């Protein structure tokens, strides 16, 4: 079985929607980190101050096929309009992995069997 790390950088207001979507599709553990992004275009707010907003970084270790399925679902959450992305989602292949819960591995195996 091959694994991927899925990283989703999303606005804080979409954090829970993304977590719910990932959990519904089979993600087990999700690590949530707070972040602050600086975009290529400054966003003007009250009194001419700029504010880019708080972001959440979601990190998941998933079976490779499941990671693509979740990536596509999260993309619909953060990018309802193809010309306006509110986040960034990507996967990174994992070569070596230790410490993953065996119950989660069993869920991944079941997902693989169901998809065949």
Image (cartoon, rainbow, N blue to C red):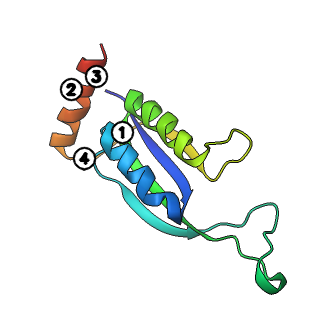
98 left or right, relative to 71 = left
Q: Secondary structure at mark 3?
A: helix
Location of the C terminus by quadrant is: top left
Mark closer to the chain start, 3 or 1: 1
Q: Which mark is residue 62?
A: 1
In this orientation, does residue 17 appear? yes
Mark closer to the chain start, 4 or 1: 1
Q: Say if mark 3 contacts mark 2, CB within 8 Å.
A: yes
In this orientation, does residue 93 appear? no
The residue mark sitting in front, 4 or 3, is: 3
Residue wearing tag 3: 112
Q: Nearer the viewer, residue 77 or 30?
A: 77
13 w.r.t. 69: above or below: below
Q: How would you rate the neighbour count of disc 3 (Cα within 10 Å): few for under 14, some for 14-19, many for 20 or more? A: some
Q: Nearer the viewer, residue 38 or 45?
A: 45
The residue mark sitting in front, 2 or 4, is: 2
Between marks 3 and 2, how big is the CA–CA gap?
Answer: 5 Å
Residue lying at the far bottom of the rendered structure = 47
Q: Secondary structure at mark 2?
A: helix
Between marks 2 and 4, how big is the CA–CA gap?
Answer: 16 Å
Residue 93 image offset from top left, x and y in percent: 47, 36
Q: Secondary structure at mark 4?
A: loop
Please report the residue visible at 51 percent of the width from the left and 34 percent of the height from the top. Answer: 72
Q: Which mark is residue 100?
A: 4
72 w.r.t. 43: above or below: above
Residue wearing tag 2: 110
1 left or right, relative to 15 = left
Q: Nearer the viewer, residue 76 or 38?
A: 76
């Amino acid at each position: 079985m091959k694994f991927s790390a899925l990283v989703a950088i999303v606005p804080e207001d979409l954090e829970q929607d993304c977590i719910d979507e990932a959990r519904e599709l089979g993600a087990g553990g999700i690590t949530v980190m707070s972040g602050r992004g600086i975009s290529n275009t400054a966003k003007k707010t009250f009194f001419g101050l700029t504010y880019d907003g708080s972001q959440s970084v979601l990190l998941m270790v998933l079976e490779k096929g499941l990671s693509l399925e979740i990536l596509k679902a999260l993309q619909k959450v953060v990018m309802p309009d193809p010309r306006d992305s509110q986040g960034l989602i990507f996967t990174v292949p994992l070569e070596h992995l230790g410490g993953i819960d065996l119950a989660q591995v069993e869920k991944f195996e079941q997902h693989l069997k169901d998809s065949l």
